[in-house]
Every structure is written in C-alpha cells, then in structure tokens.
Amino acid sequence: MNQQELKFSFKSLRKEQYEYNYRVMPFLSDWKKNPYTFLKAKFYMETSAILVYFLLKYKISPNSVTILYALCGIIGGILLAIPSKTTVLIALVIFFSKGILDWSDGHVARLSKKTSFTGHILDVYGAHLNELGFFTGLGFYIYNFSSYSFVIFIIPLYPFLVSINLNIYSKMIILNEMISGKIKLKFSENTSSGDTENKSIIKSKFLNNFQNFINSLLDSRARTVDLICLIVILELTYSFNITIYIFIILINKHFILFIGSLFYIINPSLVNNILNKISSNIDHRFSSSGLRK
C-alpha cells in the first residue's frame, strides 16, 4: 500500500479527524465540563470519518457537501411543517445529524487541498439556512400539533425579524460602499480622539456584550436544537406542549435584537467605530507585513 492510499485509509481519516478537532477545539475533549458536547463531537467525528472516506473515494467536492448541508435546512424545515408525525420525525433526524456534513466538508477540503473562502461563505450560509428552516418549521409544527391556532399569525415574524436586523445589514452596506469606493478609509498612527471616542468604545462594547448574551439564548447550536428535538418527541408521545413557549421566547429574542440594532444605527459614533476598527486592522496588517512605507 503506497503512502497516498494509506493517507486516505479509514483508520488514518478517523485519526486525522480527532487530531484536528481536538487541536482546534480542545474543549471537545473535556468530558467533565462539556459532557453533551463531548458525546456529540464523538458522534460527529466517528460518522464524518466514514462519510469522508466515501467522499474522497468517489471524488465528491467539499463545496457539494456544504451545499447539501445547506439544503438540509430547507428540506428539514418543510418536513417539520407538514402535519404528519412521520415527516416530523424524519425532520428531527435530519436536524440532529446534519452536523455530520458540516464536519465532513472541511476535512475533505483539507485533504484534497481545496480549502477556499467560498467554502467558508457556503458553510456560514448553510448554518443560517438550517437555523431559519428549523425554527420556522417549528412554528408550523406547533400550529399543526397543538391547540394554539394563533401561532400561524406569529410564524412570519421569525424570518421577518431575522432579516431586518440592522446591525448585520449596516455592515453589509459599509462593505459594499467600500468596494464601490464611496467610503475612503483613513490610516493614522493614532486613532484615539479623546473622551468622546472612549465613550463610543464603551457603548460599543456594552452593546456587543448585550447582543452576545441575547444571541446565546435559544441559539442554533447542536445542544439547543437537539434539546428542542427531544422535547418535540416527548410532545408527540405524551400529548403536551412546551415548544409554544420556546417559540414565543424566540420571537421576543429577535424583537429585542432588532430594537438593539436600531439603537446601534441611530448612534453615528458606533457606526464610525466600525470604520475605525476596519482602518485600524488594515493599517496594522500593512505595517506588520512591511508593505506600507
């Protein structure tokens, strides 16, 4: 067996999967601090190693795997919205195991030397689609399997509030304006401008910390999604409903984030702080690389 074949053997793929993920995310190996994360990571690494073996064998591109991962959100969301216990259970299986694809595409890209920023964009976009698909489908599931008929009127609020978050949209506009040349960055050795800027930085940090705290509530991480999946299974088995409260909390979460994004935008100093950070980072990178004179 030559070296190339040995590299792509299942045993070596499994070993590389463990070594890479434990090196990049050492907390995955900590059973005491993160018992569920430890077990779920084990599940992902074992199953993705098998999948990667066949993906490499049949020369499937990593971006194709990432696109399939993104489609899981759409397919799973549709199945979750259908008023049938069978399709709901299939959807739960999809959302529980979709991470196998997410843990496989990067491994395939590294081994086949096809890592790219396009792949990263698709990966983040896929995660976004999965989050939208799961929680939107959850709203329809609640409508179909509970007596809370009013939920049909608040389901559209979830994707609507997610899409109108001005914090995200403003950064996209800033990037587009920079690309078109309408915004010129100013480089300087000293970006500090006294008490006014210090207050702006304090406000920005406070808003970022507040946003991070709110985002951590009912996020799209595996432990949250898996817990909700378990609750859905129990609801279907024992005829009770908790997910309606989860969905209402979710709507309120994104409403708070939207109000926070409004406050973020109406304060010009906070937007200027974004531009200062960009110019400062670019200035530092050029200076440290010796490209600027």
Image: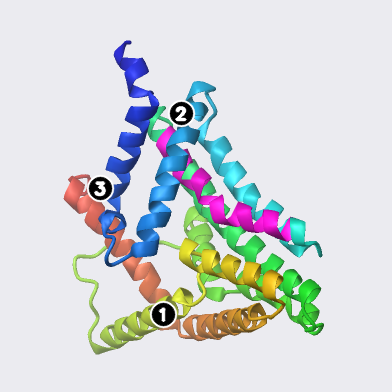
The span shown in magenta is: 87-108
Which of discs 3 and 2 lies nearer the camera? The answer is 2
Disc 2 marks which residue? 53
- Residue identified by numbered label 3: 23
Marks 3/1: CA–CA distance: 27 Å
Which of pointers 3 and 2 lies earlier in the amino acid sequence?
A: 3
Q: Mark 3 is on which residue type?
A: Arg
**Which badge, 3 or 1, is on the more N-terminal residue?**
3
Question: Crowding at label 1, few (<14), some or many (≥20) Cα neighbours within 10 Å?
Answer: few
Residue 213 - label: 1
Of badges 2 and 1, nearer the viewer stands: 2
* Residue 229 on the magenta span: no
Verify whether residue 101 appears in magenta: yes
Q: Report x, y in % for residue 39.
A: 39, 56
Q: CA distance from mark 2 to mark 1?
A: 39 Å
- The type of residue carrying mark 2 is Tyr
159 w.r.t. 79: above or below: below
Q: Secondary structure at mark 3?
A: helix
Residue 185 appears anywhere in the view: no
> Would you say the residues marked 3 and 2 are in contact, meaning their CB atoms lie under 8 Å apart?
no
Amino acid under disc 1: Phe
Q: Quadrant of residue 93?
A: bottom right
Q: Residue at x 36, y 75 (%)?
A: 273
Residue 45 x, y percent position in the rendering:
40, 44
Q: Quadrant of the N terminus?
A: top left
First reached walking from the N terminus: tag 2 or tag 1: 2
**Is 167 rendered above or below residue 29?**
below
